[in-house]
Image (cartoon, rainbow, N blue to C red):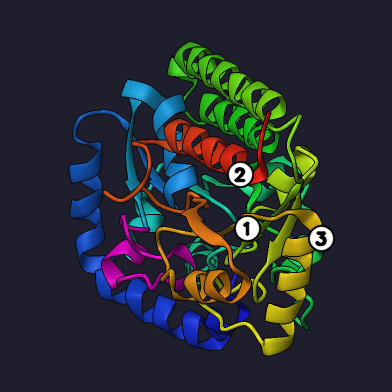
Amino acid sequence: MNIRRLIPAAAVTGAVALGLTAVTACSSSDNSDHKSDGRLDVVASFYPMQFLAERIGGDHVSVTSLTKPGVEPHDLELSPRQTGRLSDADFILYLKGLQPAVDEAIKQSGASHTLDAATLTTLEDHGTETGGEEHGHEHEGDEAGADPHIWLDPVKYTEVAEGVGKSLEKTDPDHAADYRKNTDALVKELGALDTAYRTGLKNTATKTFITTHSAFGYLAERYGLTQEGIAGIDPEAEPSPARISALHDIAEKKKVTTVFFETLASDKTAKTVARDTGLKTDVLDPLEGITDSSKGDDYIEVMKSNLAALRSALGAK
């Protein structure tokens, strides 16, 4: 996560307070509209949370994402209407530490049925393989410095999915059996995805990959790879001459072939590094949102595309 993007807490608090005040008069009618079909009104912070809510909730939930397709999640600014919706939602699923504006809005809303996905697994420090001064991701509370990109590790994402399923069962016990069935089906899919990654990345010519966005620490650790970030945790940051030189040495020693970039950020930095180091470029999607340019229609499909890209770049046998 880009630390320079973080909004000062006081500023966010003031904006949230104004937003809550502005929508008080209309929130009741909005709420009745969302609940008119009898489904559970679920608000997800961004795509990985939306995917879990939709797959596990099935026909019993109506899911709204605070982050629209194509919007960089870290940069999200909530409208007064979105902020007001939080206090009316039946269930809010978010990932604390990734979107400061969302964290503060949820805190100010006083919503009772909230679930922080970060509490469902163990967060770790990643994103430090940059040769620079930035270390990890800012995260409030006891997990300061922890990397929030847990969804890019199918095993950790499975732990989150199981926790979401149990929470939905408690929130809506009348449909608990369906939530459990849907959770089991998703866990099976994620297990197959994990197996595909383990098998597909077991024998490769190199274990090192270079990326503009140091979001793949959990994935790299899970499958015995090494992530080399270009310029820290900002996918569009310009690397220093020293870092370019270091990456050139790494590429040569570790037989790196590819510089990866993401779909929601400019590929300028990746192309610059690739040109200076004689490497090619490709997409490794951190799955923070699905757009028309995504190589797949959902989490599972894009993760399979990521696996294919990694196998190609790493020289899988």
Give the structural element (helix, strand or loop) at label 3.
helix
The amino acid type of the residue labelled 2 equals Leu
**Residue drawn at (72%, 71%) of the image:** 247
For marks 1 and 2, the one nearer the N-term is: 2
Report the front residue among 111 and 278. 278
Question: Is residue 220 placed above or below 239 in the rendered structure?
Answer: above
Place of residue 210 in the rendered image (x, y in percent of width and height, measured from the top left): 65, 60
Span colored in magenta: 67-83
Q: In which quarter of the image is residue 127?
A: bottom right
The residue to which callout 2 is attached is 152
Q: Name the residue under label 1.
A: 215
| Residue 98 in picture, x, y percent from top left | 58, 63
Question: In which quadrant is the N terminus drawn?
Answer: bottom right
Q: Which of marks 3 and 1 is in front?
A: 3
- Near-viewer residue (28 or 119): 119
Residue 125 seen from this side: no
Which residue corresponds to the image point at 74% horizontal and 40% vertical from the top-left?
205
Per the image, label 1 sits on a secondary structure element best described as loop
Q: Residues within 10 Å of mark 3 (few under 14, many from 20)?
A: few
Is residue 164 part of the magenta span, yes or no? no
- Examine the image and state in which quarter residue 240 appears: bottom right
Q: Which mark is residue 253?
A: 3
* Quarter containing the C terminus: top right
